[in-house]
Every structure is written in structure tokens, then in C-alpha cells.
Amino acid sequence: MNFPKRKQKILAQLDKDDQVDVKQLADELQISEITIRRDLNHLAADGLLYRTHGGATKVNPFEKPHDFANKAARNAAAKDEICRVAASQINDGDVIFMDCGSTVFRLCQFIKNKKIKVITNSLPVICELQNCAVSLNIIGGEFDKDRQAVHGSMAIEHISKYRASKAFLGVDGISENGLFAGSENEASITTAFANSCAYTYLLCDASKIGRESYLRFADVSLVNALITNADKDKLVGIEKRGVFMLSTKK
């Protein structure tokens, strides 16, 4: 049984019982306890569970909602490679914007030791970066419990009062035809961040490239650089529009 299938079974067991035991999982999945411990450590690093001495417990939904954690864990390896490249663009002293995207959230693990200021509308980002070297500025406004983020006119006004050196943002889709969002709230926040920073990075895994949803909210020129794991042939049209490409491909 490969890791993705084991992961599904482990998370299903957590949903049912709120906790899992290493020995019990090893017996049920017919694999070694060493492998189960490695799996649990990996899932804990992704924020999907809490590690205990003999197993794991379910993540507190008030700290990091299960739906968001699952979304952040999709295409986790690709997102982490994208975020490693993004983190390499951040220097001590930077003031950066981070939105509420699930890929952007995974950037947190790579910047905890950087002496920077993060301005964000994302509750999971705030939770992840508390008690580390990063200084935090929390955007105020209407709280969206589904997105675990702050949106609305007050949030836009808050963003406009600041100037960041860099922004790290996500979108629902990007093509040579423009940037696409899943809602007007997301579109307005993305635009506000981009308009208030010196340089905008878009973090998109391959599934977002060429994807067009119902709401086209901006031209690709809104962003300066795209960090992605997509094949180069899928990026030609976007690159021709003046967007700088940073690829995770060697």
C-alpha cells in the first residue's frame, strides 16, 4: 500500500476516533511500526494531525480547520518545492504580504527563522507563524470561516495603508488571458495586495496553469513573477505577457 492510500486510512481513522495508535495502525495496514511513525511524522509536518508518544491525535479545528488542512496538503510535495523557491526570494528586513491561499500557507514552514514582517489576512498563517522570528500584522475586517481569512472593504482599506517589498499570492487559475478567482472577495484582496507592493510573486502548482474560472479579475501583468512546477511549454503564453518565470524544474 502506497503512502497516499495509507494517508487516507489514517485520516479516516482520526475522523472516526479522534486518535490513532502506532501499533494498531501497523497491524491494520500490515506494515511496520517504523513506516507508520514516518507517515505520522509526515502528516504532522503538513498540519493534518498532532503527534503523540504512541500515535497521534486529531488537529484542533479551532486552530487549523480540517478542510483547510486537507486543501493545503493536496499536491503537498509540489507546493513545498514552489515555496522553497519563494522563500529564497525573501531576505531579512523584508515586509511581505501573504494571502490566504493554501499554497502560500505552506510558505510558512520555510520562513520561520527570517527576521521579516508578514502582513496577512489568513488565520492559519497567523497561527503557524506565531512565536517565531517573524513579526506579524493581522488585517482587520469581516472573517470568512470557510476560507479562514479576512475579507471586505475594511480589509482592503487596511492593506492600502501599508507598503510591502514583496507579495506572495495565489489564484484560482492563470492563463495568458488573465488571472482568475473563485470569488469577488478573493479577487479584491489579491488586487489590493498586488497594488500595494513593489514586487508580486504568484505561487501556483501545475493544476492552476491554463485554468480559467468564471471570474477573470485582472491581466497577468498584475504580477511580476510566477513560481510553479508546470512544464515550460505550458508557460509560453504567460511568459510572453511579461511575467518572469521561476521554475522548480531542474
Image (tube, helix red, strand yellow):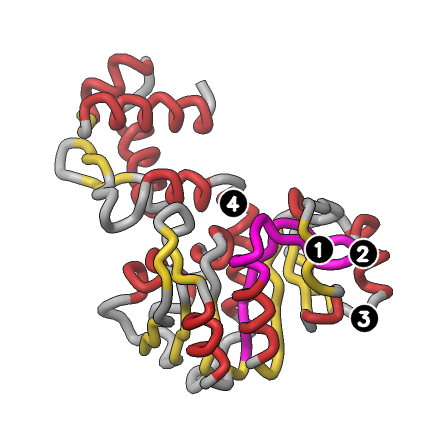
The magenta region covers 166-187
Mark 3 and mark 2 lie on one chain; the one further toward the N terminus is: 2
**For the residues bearing labels 1 and 2, Cβ distance under 8 angstroms:** yes
Image location (x, y in percent) of residue 241: 83, 66
Q: Residue at x 71, y 49 (%)?
A: 209
- Report the side of 54 relative to 193 (left or right): left
Q: Which residue is mark 1?
A: 216
For marks 1 and 2, give the CA distance.
Answer: 8 Å
Image location (x, y in percent) of residue 125: 36, 61
Mark 4, secondary structure of its residue: helix
In the displayed orientation, state which residue is furthest to the front. Answer: 153
Can you tell which mark lies on residue 242? 3
Mark 1 and mark 2 lie on one chain; the one further toward the N terminus is: 2
Q: Amino acid at mark 4?
A: Ala
For marks 3 and 2, give the CA distance.
Answer: 13 Å
The label nearer to you, 1 versus 2, is: 1
Q: Amino acid at mark 1?
A: Arg
Mark 3 and mark 1 lie on one chain; the one further toward the N terminus is: 1
Instruction: Answer whether residue 231 is visible to the viewer in this image.
Output: yes
Image location (x, y in percent) of residue 220: 74, 64
Residue 169 among those drawn in magenta: yes
Q: Residue at x 27, y 39 (%)?
A: 49
Can you tell which mark lies on residue 177? 2
Q: Which residue is mark 4?
A: 77
Can you tell which mark lies on residue 24? none
How would you rate the neighbour count of disc 2 (Cα within 10 Å): few for under 14, some for 14-19, many for 20 or more? some
- Which quadrant is home to the N terminus? top left
For marks 4 and 2, give the CA distance.
Answer: 28 Å
For marks 1 and 4, give the CA distance.
Answer: 28 Å
For marks 3 and 1, give the CA distance.
Answer: 18 Å
The vertical placement of 230 against 134, above or below, is: above
Q: Amino acid at mark 2?
A: Asn
